[in-house]
Structures are given as structure tokens and as C-alpha cells.
């Protein structure tokens, strides 16, 4: 699993940079400052948690467990739901997606908790 999560982290980081560049160059002047800030929040959390997937890969290489695997999947789901809902909210104007974003946040928190548990139990 460590290889899978390292690859997932690299792909997530690549996509985070792409979305960040798109926000900085493609959306500048097209969005309100508030919407641009929301988009940037999505990018920031996307990139932080892409790096978190590398931490999961490292832990999986040292102490493989079900909790480590769960941690990686929770971070992936969290990135998709948290950052993805913010991206779509801003680009589509569908404000109701703001209600979905906390579900992604909970997945991110649970991912870090599972990683801590995996290391603690090892």
C-alpha cells in the first residue's frame, strides 16, 4: 500500500499545483475576491493533504496496518470532497455545496486520527 499512497500523493500534489495555477492565472479577475479566497482554501488543503499521503506511505512502509490503509483512503476522500466541493462551488456558483465541504473536513480529520492510531498501535 505504501507505493499506492506515494503515487496518490504525487498525483494529488500535481493536481493541486495545476488547480493553484489555474486559480492564480485563469480565474484572476473573473472571480470576486471572496470566491478566489475560497478557491485558494481548497488548493491549500489539497496540497497539505497530498503531502499527508506521503506520510501515510512512509508509515505504511514501517508499520503496515488496516489503520494506515484507512488513513490513506480517508485523506483521498477528504481531498476530493473538501477541496473538490470548494472548487465546484466557486466555478459553478452552486452555494449549496458549502454544506458538503464539512464532510470532507471530517474525513481529513479522521485520516490524521487513523494515522496517529496506526503509529501508536505499532
Image (cartoon, grey):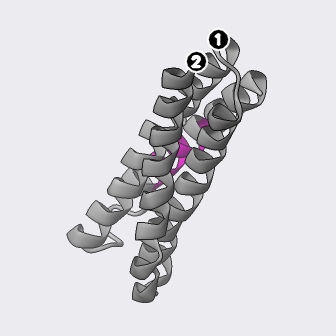
Farthest residue to the front: give it. 121
In front here: 63 or 42? 63
Does residue 30 appear to the left or right of 63 in the view shown? left
Q: Crowding at label 1, few (<14), some or many (≥20) Cα neighbours within 10 Å?
A: few
Residue that appears at 69% across and 31% down:
5
In front here: 87 or 26? 87
In front here: 22 or 81? 81
Q: Which residues are magenta?
A: 14-22
| Mark seen at residue 1 | none
Q: Earlier in the sequence, mark 2 or mark 1?
A: 1
Quadrant for the N terminus in the image: top right
Farthest residue to the top: give it. 62
Mark 2 vs mark 1, foreground winner is 2
Q: Secondary structure at mark 1?
A: helix
Q: Which quadrant holds residue 40?
A: bottom left
Marks 2 and 1: CB-CB under 8 Å? yes
Q: How many marks?
A: 2
Which residue is labeled 1 in the image?
62
Q: Is residue 114 magenta?
A: no
Which residue is labeled 2 in the image?
122
Q: Is residue 17 magenta?
A: yes
**Label 2 to label 1: alpha-carbon separation:** 9 Å
Quadrant for the C terminus in the image: top right
Where does the image place residue 117, in percent across and percent down from the top left? 50, 32
Amino acid at each position: 500500500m505504501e507505493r499506492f499512497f506515494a503515487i496518490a500523493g504525487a498525483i494529488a500534489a500535481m493536481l493541486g499545483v495545476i488547480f493553484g495555477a489555474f486559480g492564480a492565472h485563469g480565474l484572476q479577475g473573473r472571480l470576486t475576491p471572496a470566491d478566489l479566497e475560497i478557491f485558494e482554501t481548497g488548493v491549500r488543503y489539497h496540497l497539505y493533504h497530498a503531502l499527508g499521503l506521503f506520510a501515510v506511505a512512509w508509515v505504511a512502509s514501517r508499520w503496515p496496518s488496516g489503520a494506515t490503509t484507512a488513513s490513506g483512503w480517508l485523506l483521498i476522500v477528504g481531498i476530493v470532497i473538501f477541496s473538490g466541493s470548494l472548487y465546484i462551488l466557486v466555478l459553478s456558483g452552486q452555494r449549496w455545496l458549502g454544506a458538503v465541504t464539512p464532510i470532507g473536513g471530517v474525513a481529513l480529520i479522521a485520516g490524521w486520527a487513523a494515522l496517529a492510531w496506526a503509529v501508536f498501535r505499532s
